[in-house]
Image: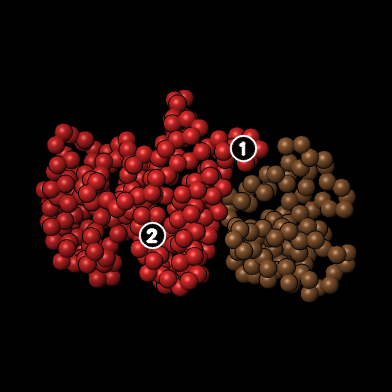
Amino acid sequence: MFRRSSLAIAPRFLWECLSSQTVNPFPAPATSHPACGFPALGAPVCFLPRFTKAHLPIIALTAYAMKGDSERFIAAGMDAYISKPINAATLESAMAIAFYGAGASGQIKSPTKNASESEPECEVSWSEAETLKKLGGDNQLLQEVIEIFLEEAPKHLAALRFGLEEESGDAVERAAHSLKGELGYLSISELSKSALELEESERNSDLESVSRMLPTFEASVWRLLISIRKSKSMASEGQHGAGPTGAIPS
Amino acid sequence: MGFDQPGEACQRVLVAEDDAMFRKILHNWLHSWGYQVTIAEDGAKAWEILQGDSAPQLPILDWMMPEPNGVELCRLIRERNSSPYQYIVLLTAKDDK
């Protein structure tokens, strides 16, 4: 809704898109290696800073997760890479890393992320058992509620970011309010409190504070979403996850 | 959760809530308790439903939703001076108010 996407089928077209004033600054391009030709990727990556004011996140797609590829991706300036065959959850997680620096696990690699680069993130814990209790022990409803949260939370985050960029206080307040309620209901009190702070800052016309708090909040929510997805995936495969109460991995 | 079936005085309930998660929860609970639940995703839709034939007898209104919000919608309902008196439940996450 709030993000643009374009498709390029050859490096030349990709470079034209990235160089175009009409689409610049361009959000996270996902580039294919070696279809594009990995050495050729060096050109756009190296020259991009001339065209963009801010850091341009780049995600690599690769059919080969060869040893040493990670270093090559880092050298080329990639922010994350995903191995083919890709699935929606993996790509979504990689997008989260690229845009918000959210930690992830599994197939997704974030070669440039390290402790010194990341902002301090609040500790997040989620009690599935507590939420289940609120829902009267209805496990099916719990699963449906979680599915809705996984679908809706990214929309709220996008609305929050969009509202901030457009300086729309109402949009910021509404999105923060929704996230506060949902996170609170899921007993994720730390993040619900952060959402409340965002909501209150907007109400006090303090968009500067919203701007300062938002990146850490986004990253924390994405970490949560990734963790819940992973937990659900493991549960559906018949494995045991973190249990009814699990800390969200950094 | 064990609840009696609703009486004839109030069987039809309107849930006006813009948040999908809370819509789902409220719908499930109310439906399982035997109510006929109508859902509106914003205030405008809720107002349209409340003015229709066989309108729900009990509106549950989210305070903060696209206009009219729950409080504004409550005022609109009261301005009608309809009979019998209509009870309204206001739902809010503004727990600091």
- Residue A166, percent from left and from top: 41, 71
Residue at 62% x, 41% y: name it.
A134
Q: How many marks?
A: 2
Residue at 62% x, 64% y: name it.
B97
Residue at 50% x, 69% y: name it.
A203
Image height of A180 relative to A65, above or below: below
Residue type at mark 2 is: Leu
Residue underneath mark 1: A133
- Judged left or right of residue A171, residue B54 is right
Give the color of chain A as drawn: red
Question: Sequence order check: which comes first, mark 2 or mark 1?
Answer: 1
Rendered image: mark on residue A55: none
- Residue B56, percent from left and from top: 78, 58
Residue underneath mark 2: A214
* Mark 2 crowd level (few <14, some 14–19, many ≥20, 10 Å Cα): many
Q: Chain of mark 1?
A: A
Using the numbered discs, state the Cα–Cα distance from disc 2 to disc 1 in whole angstroms. 31 Å
Residue at 51% x, 38% y: name it.
A127
* Mark 1 crowd level (few <14, some 14–19, many ≥20, 10 Å Cα): few
Q: Let me know if residue A151 appears in the view.
A: no
